[in-house]
Amino acid sequence: MTRVALVTGGSRGIGAAISTALKDAGYSVAATYAGNEEKAAAFTAETGIKTYKWNVADYEACAAGVKQIEADLGPVDILVNNAGITRDAPFHKMTPQQWHECIDTNLNGVFNMTHNVWGGMRERKFGRIVTISSINGQKGQFAQANYAATKAGDIGFTKSLAQEGARAGITVNIVAPGYINTEMMSTIPEKVMNDVILPQIPVGRLGEAAEIARAVQFLVSDDAGFVTGSTLSANGGQYMS
Ligand code: NDP
């Protein structure tokens, strides 16, 4: 039986690496994106993985999107909540808009997506949910009160749902990456990268998206049924909780 995996924000960055790794592992994969048509079209052309556009912050759009993917590929067995944004600012300068955009995508988006696959997973007595949190949700980060709150919230959400899903064969886990070499990182000035960020990482380099994908691939496998409610940190030793 081919399991169906839905990866939010699966068209680029870490999400693209996850989508590709799952496809290569034999899953039937659907990747979603928010609006970058060009990247999504290029990703589909390159990988053959179909992409679907909607905003994870919109509950009804998530419901309709999941329905469409289930019509195209079959019931969703695996959900990877990867879509995420940053809206950085020191708190005294943070606008309500920056706060709400982060919460709406990174935390409400995780609710919206998970809620729309949960019932089916419970009925079928199988499910795998992995949410991509962040090292900054574990330790906090200057100018990221909004982002860190969402990523810490994702961890509490996961630990709670792991308890609710256990009897129904649904595992719910977190992967918490450290600094990964993606476009999100390209906004960081080179001097900050070399003088501030890299010296904090014991392995001495950024992580690669493929390394996060491999962690996800393990957690969504049928073999990982005894691993639930856990947070798998992949941060080069930068933070050990
Ligand atoms: P990218 O910015 O490279 O890609 C983000 C993806 O999410 C894109 O596909 C984007 O779609 C999609 N997306 C963004 N907002 C929405 C939305 N509202 N609805 C639907 N899709 C959306 O991100 P990364 O690959 O860097 O990060 C992926 C995840 O990993 C995030 O949750 C991030 O917080 C987390 N993370 C990243 C780290 C890093 O170092 N990069 C470190 C720790 C955690 P579109 O292409 O259309 O914009």
Image: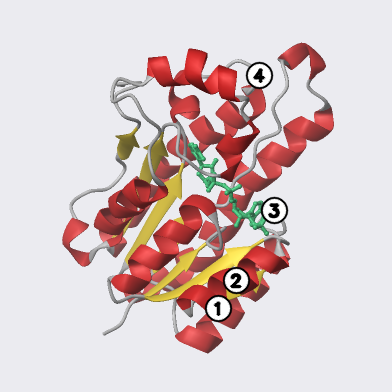
- Give residue 149's position: percent from left, percent from top: 58, 28
Using the image, determine if residue 150 lies above or below residue 143.
below
Q: Which residue is mark 2?
A: 42
Q: Is mark 3 within 8 Å of ligand 1?
A: yes
Q: Earlier in the sequence, mark 2 or mark 4?
A: 2
Query: Which scheme is used to colour this image of the protein?
Result: secondary structure
Q: Residue at x 20, y 56 (%)?
A: 224
Q: Distance of mark 4 from mark 3, alpha carbons?
A: 22 Å
Q: Secondary structure at mark 4?
A: loop
Q: Which mark is residue 57?
A: 3
The kind of residue on which mark 2 rests is: Ala
**Nearer the camera: disc 3 or disc 2:** 2
Q: Distance of mark 4 from mark 1, alpha carbons?
A: 37 Å
Q: Earlier in the sequence, mark 4 or mark 1?
A: 1
Q: Secondary structure at mark 2?
A: helix
Q: Secondary structure at mark 3?
A: loop
- Give residue 144's position: percent from left, percent from top: 63, 23
**Nearer the camera: disc 2 or disc 4:** 2
- Out of 181 and 125, give the one closest to the viewer: 181
**Nearer the camera: disc 4 or disc 3:** 4
Q: Specify whether residue 81 is in view.
A: no
Q: Distance of mark 2 from mark 4, alpha carbons?
A: 33 Å
The kind of residue on which mark 1 rests is: Ala
Q: Residue at x 32, y 34 (%)?
A: 233
Q: Which residue is mark 4?
A: 143
Local crowd size for mark 4, using a 10 Å CA cut-off: few (<14), some (14–19), many (≥20): some
Q: Residue at x 52, y 61 (%)?
A: 10
